[in-house]
Image (cartoon, rainbow, N blue to C red):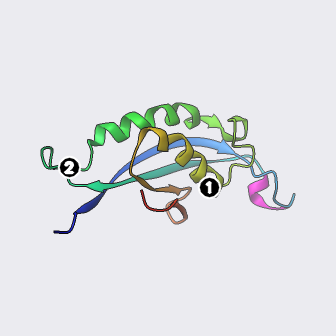
Amino acid sequence: MATTRLEVVKSFRFEAAHLLPNVAESHKCRRLHGHSFAVDVHVRGPLGPVTGWVLDFADVAGAWEPVHELVDHRYLNEVPGLDNPTSEVLAVWIWDHLSPSLPGLAKVVVHETCTSAVVYERGSP
């Protein structure tokens, strides 16, 4: 019998400012600006036979809280590890901060605007 694997997704928001120091001086993102970021955290795993879930959404929220404290209403360039805070770098940084407390982490999606996002996956858990 095949093992059923599901993916749960919890979404979060934070506000932050940044600039991209490695783009041309004339690029608009070289100037200080802010975003209302949205982050989707995907966790993949089997259906728990007793709980009926992959994991409690509260566990995802608990793992997110320390990350949120580091980035919400911050100047991202001053956050350790985010000196060039592109959405791509931010997605990897978030993964690195979440993965120790979220076994089964499958994907991190960072939306920097309502029409632009980055998806980061690091193989199958």
Q: Identify whether 116 is placed above or below 44.
A: below
Instruction: Please tell me which residue is depicted at 12% across the width and 44% down the height of the picture.
Output: 50
User: Tag 2: Cα neighbours inside 10 Å, few (<14), some, or many (≥20)?
Assistant: some
Say if the magenta span includes residue 98: no
Q: Amino acid at mark 2?
A: Trp
Instruction: Please tell me which residue is depicted at 82% across the width and 55% down the height of the picture.
Output: 22
Per the rendering, the mark at residue 87 is 1
Q: Could you say where residue 75 lies in the image, as x and y percent from the top left?
A: 67, 37
Report helix, strand or loop for mark 2: loop
Q: Could you say where residue 123 lies in the image, as x and y percent from the top left?
A: 49, 62
Magenta stretch in the rendered image = 26-30
**Tag 1 or tag 2, which sits nearer the N-term?**
2
State whether the magenta stretch is mostly helix, strand or loop. Answer: helix
Q: Where is mark 2, residue-wise?
A: 53
Tell me: 28 left or right of 50.
right
Looking at the picture, tell me which residue is in the foreground, 56 or 45: 45
Report helix, strand or loop for mark 1: helix
Q: How many marks?
A: 2
